[in-house]
Amino acid sequence: MVPLSPFPAAGSPLDLIGFPMDLGADRRGVDMGPSALRIACLHDRLQRLGYAVTDHGDLAIPIRERLLVESPCLKYLSAIVNAAETLAHMVRTSLGDGRFPLCLGGDHTIALGSLAGIGAYCRDAGRTPGVIWIDAHADMNTDLTTPSGNIHGMALAASLGFGHQRLTHLLGFAPKIKPEHCVLIGVRRLDPGERERINDLGLTVATMTDIDRRGLAAIIDEALATLRTKVDYLHVSFDLDSIDPAVAGGVGTPVAGGLSYREAHLLMETIAECDCVDSLDLAEVNPILDTANRSAELAVELIASLMGKRIL
């Protein structure tokens, strides 16, 4: 069994990094996600859990009205690559300084930057990264399979080394993570090209059908047990649209039939109990589509569950 790193203890230093990106998708509003999470008292909640929090503010992201669409299959490619590289350097620095990077989105192109930074740090440190990808979507398209040209649907594929070179080779290397070190949970909408790539790679995917049949507890326990034998670094990339829109309606790309409130908390609580999480993305909070910031408040609750909040 590979000894995963210990979970951050009380008083551990934690970096908040805002990634207010909405260029990866057509629907507007997710650029306000980091602000919505802060308004929902994320900083205070983390401090009450004992973390020494430094908020680095938000990266500067250009608005799309000032940009040209360079390719209909790779919308806003240059702006997304530039922002992702900046985030990657920040994540790499945070980890190198012994801190926990918590990246706030923004659309799921956030993972391009976070996984690049994680991959670079792990290469330097001689560690093997793994990721639990919690999302209604697999984000496994490339510029050759995308039906929309939206890069947020390519983030995981690019991190695994598939797609346009400017996406796959952020920080000059690929892949950032290996397919056998990746587990997808909550998937319920796939494009044909994604389905084919997932099957070709043999990715471990727990769809909502799997969760209905087997139960979430068994699935996450099995995923953690498997990852423990393969990796010694664990990243969680959580897209809020993994939750049913009846519970979390303020998301970028809602899909009916997602995780329930309690399933989402069970998932985060179970991952927390493994004492092995090294970094986190929280993506796709869209306050424009929300009511009274409830989805951001739920997201903060889920972050707290992952970061050690206990009922007893």
Image (cartoon, rainbow, N blue to C red):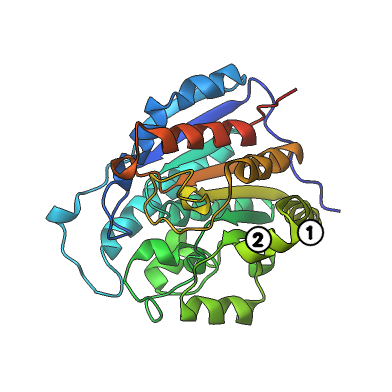
Drawn side of residue 256 relative to residue 131, left or right: left
Q: Residue 122: x, y in percent?
A: 62, 51
Please identify the residue farthest to the left as the structure is shown: 66
Does residue 94 sit above or below 132 in this rendering? above
Which corner quadrant of the image does residue 270 belong to? top right
Which badge, 1 or 2, is on the more N-terminal residue?
2
Q: Is residue 70 left or right of residue 81?
A: left
Label 1: few (<14), some (14–19) or many (≥20) C-alpha neighbours in 10 Å: some
Rendered residue at 47%/54% (across/down): 111
Residue 27: x and y in percent read 28, 56
- Looking at the image, do the residues carrying marks 1 and 2 touch, with CB atoms under 8 Å apart? yes
Work out whether residue 145 or residue 19 is closer to the camera in this orientation and state it: 145
Instruction: Left or right? Give the position of 149 relative to 40.
Output: left
> Relative to the observer, which residue lies in front, 223 or 70?
223
Residue 306 numbered mark, or none? none
Which of the numbered marks, if any, corresponds to residue 226? 1
From the top left corner, tell me how far across and down residue 306 is, in percent: 63, 36
Helix, strand, or loop for circle 1? helix
Residue at position x 36%, y 64% from top?
A: 151
Q: Is residue 90 visible?
A: yes
Place of residue 180 in the rendered image (x, y in percent of width and height, measured from the top left): 69, 67
Residue under label 2, please give it: 183
Q: Amino acid at mark 2?
A: Val
Whether residue 178 is visible, yes or no, is no
Residue at the location (48% across, 47% down)?
240
